[in-house]
Image (cartoon, rainbow, N blue to C red):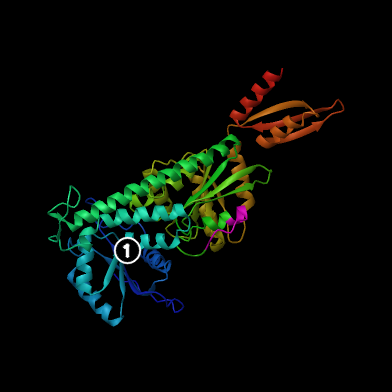
């Protein structure tokens, strides 16, 4: 099966690229299974190439009923690819699946063109997008882990030997073994550096815990609109564009809810289907903010036909990292881009969301529609488990009154003629306990 692809006349930079999206048989005995529509899967593949300005001049979907161990695809496809390389003057062929080092090498030989797989392409995007020192560390670690598994591709001359003195690089040791040791050393160093990042992040988190502002974390499939939503809520200027993996580096901002309560908003890296675990694991230090978050906003592209499959991918990746966000008390499904839906589609989306039984909000971050509803749901979630106290304080106790305003939600206030300030305030259990202890010590 071939899906017709029309090149974008406005995108003429970068290597001339041809995209192959192979649909492989499902694991097990159930035969071929397509989780996503071939059209949207191919669009995503082309979008990945666009993220690093590759000039995609053609793309197609291929059903592979019997994957070949040596080349993945059959002889007919190989011959056609070789013709495409000549006719389209290709610089690069992207296979939107994971290839073994041997398959990649054989495909390059048969087609006469450079070949990369899905993981290699995503790594290129990661490398182009990371801006912070932490992001670059994470990308370098992922690159090295990927490179280590493919050394055989770089060094086909396994008979090449290198002598040396001592136990390192001794006589008879092959070049590939030396390269592997060098990469392992770099990986160890990078993991130590990321451990330092994790410790620093923990130290930064302690002051926030001492002044317990709730943390709201955004997660979601790449290009679901997390950064646009983050910018709308926080007034920040995080890079947000209609590109896959537009944002890799974590960003945090302090914002205020409509009731005046301050919270910390955290944007995170977007996820994507079939992402190898070690690539996501490289970002675990960043994703710790999700683990610590009081509320997790799972941002989903409501206009995406494969929305449910994308949402499941996000949950599975987080679960593989030991991060459970399916706790109904802190998870909110945020259906973004509803401005692209018809009234009938919006109604069906609401029915489906209500059937799930989880808190949900429909909005358009780009149009700034529905943000008030989201803020109300966040406030409701934060109120779960909080205690409501009636407090009377002398008006002269400005410090005590300020403490209650800072730590809790003041629902009502009455200043009487006797010089008392009567407050009804809602506090987290820990703060309610601190207040009672403070009162008992003063009395």
Residue at 61% in and 61% down: 367
Of residue 93 and residue 168, the one placed in the foreground of this image is: 168
Residue 322 seen in the figure: yes
Residue at 24% in and 53% down: 180
Of residue 398 and residue 45, the one placed in the foreground of this image is: 398
Q: Residue 323: horizontal and vertical position, in percent?
A: 42, 42
Q: Is residue 36 magenta?
A: no
Q: Main secondary structure of the magenta part?
A: loop
Residue lying furthest top? 443
Q: Is residue 233 magenta?
A: yes
Q: Residue 212: horizontal and vertical position, in percent?
A: 59, 36
Q: Residue 184: horizontal and vertical position, in percent?
A: 28, 50
Q: Residue 244: horizontal and vertical position, in percent?
A: 44, 62
Circle 1 Cα neighbour tier, 10 Å, few/some/many (<14 / 14–19 / ≥20): many
203 relative to 347, above or below: above
Residue at 21% in and 54% down: 178
Residue lying furthest front? 165
For this view, does 147 lie left or right of residue 366?
Answer: left
Residues drawn in magenta: 231-240
Of residue 401 and residue 65, the one placed in the foreground of this image is: 401
For this view, does 45 lie left or right of residue 440?
Answer: left
243 relative to 310, above or below: below
391 relative to 98, above or below: above
321 relative to 42, above or below: above
Instruction: Please name the residue that numbered disc 1 is placed on.
Output: 96
Residue 73 seen in the figure: no
Q: Quadrant of the C terminus?
A: top right
For this view, does 338 lie left or right of residue 162?
Answer: right
State the count of labels: 1
Circle 1 sits in a helix, a strand or a loop, which is it?
loop
Q: Quadrant of the N terminus?
A: bottom left
Q: Quadrant of residue 428?
A: top right
């Amino acid at each position: 099966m071939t899906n017709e692809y029309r090149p974008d006349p406005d995108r003429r930079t970068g290597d001339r690229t041809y995209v192959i999206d192979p649909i492989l048989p499902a694991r097990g005995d159930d035969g071929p299974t397509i989780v996503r529509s071939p059209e949207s899967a191919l669009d995503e593949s082309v979008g990945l190439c666009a993220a690093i300005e590759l000039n995609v001049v053609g793309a197609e979907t291929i059903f592979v009923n019997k994957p070949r161990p040596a080349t993945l695809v059959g002889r007919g496809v190989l011959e056609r690819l070789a013709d495409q390389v000549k006719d389209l003057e290709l610089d690069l062929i992207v296979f939107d699946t994971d290839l073994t080092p041997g398959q990649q090498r054989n495909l390059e030989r048969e087609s006469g063109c450079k070949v990369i797989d899905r993981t290699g392409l995503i790594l290129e995007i990661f490398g182009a997008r990371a801006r912070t020192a932490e992001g670059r560390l994470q990308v370098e670690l992922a690159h090295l882990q990927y490179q280590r598994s493919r050394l055989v591709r770089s060094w086909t001359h396994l008979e090449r030997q290198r002598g040396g003195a001592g136990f390192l690089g001794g006589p008879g040791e092959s070049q590939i073994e030396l390269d592997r040791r060098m990469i392992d050393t770099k990986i160890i160093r990078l993991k130590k550096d990321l451990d330092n990042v994790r410790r620093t992040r923990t130290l930064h988190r302690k002051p926030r815990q001492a002044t317990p502002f709730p943390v709201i974390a955004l997660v979601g499939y790449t290009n679901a609109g997390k950064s646009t939503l983050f910018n709308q809520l926080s007034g920040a200027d995080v890079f947000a564009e209609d590109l896959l993996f537009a944002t890799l580096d974590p960003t945090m901002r302090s914002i205020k809810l409509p009731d005046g309560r301050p919270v910390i908003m955290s944007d995170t890296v977007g996820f994507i289907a079939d992402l190898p675990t070690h690539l996501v694991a490289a970002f675990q230090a960043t994703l710790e903010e999700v683990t610590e978050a009081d509320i997790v906003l799972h941002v989903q592209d409501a206009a995406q036909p494969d929305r449910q499959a994308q949402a499941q991918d996000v949950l599975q990746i987080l679960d593989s990292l030991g991060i459970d966000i399916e706790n109904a008390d802190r998870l909110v499904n945020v259906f973004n881009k509803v401005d692209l839906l018809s009234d009938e589609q919006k109604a069906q989306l609401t029915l489906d969301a209500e059937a799930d039984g989880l808190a949900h909000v429909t909005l358009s971050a780009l149009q700034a529609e529905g943000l008030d509803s989201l803020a109300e749901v966040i406030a409701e979630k934060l109120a779960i488990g909080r205690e409501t106290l009636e407090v009377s304080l002398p008006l002269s106790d400005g410090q005590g009154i300020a403490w209650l305003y800072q730590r809790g939600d003041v629902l009502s206030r009455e200043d009487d003629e006797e010089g008392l300030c009567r407050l009804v305030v809602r506090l987290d259990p820990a703060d309610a306990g601190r207040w009672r202890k403070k009162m008992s010590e003063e009395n």
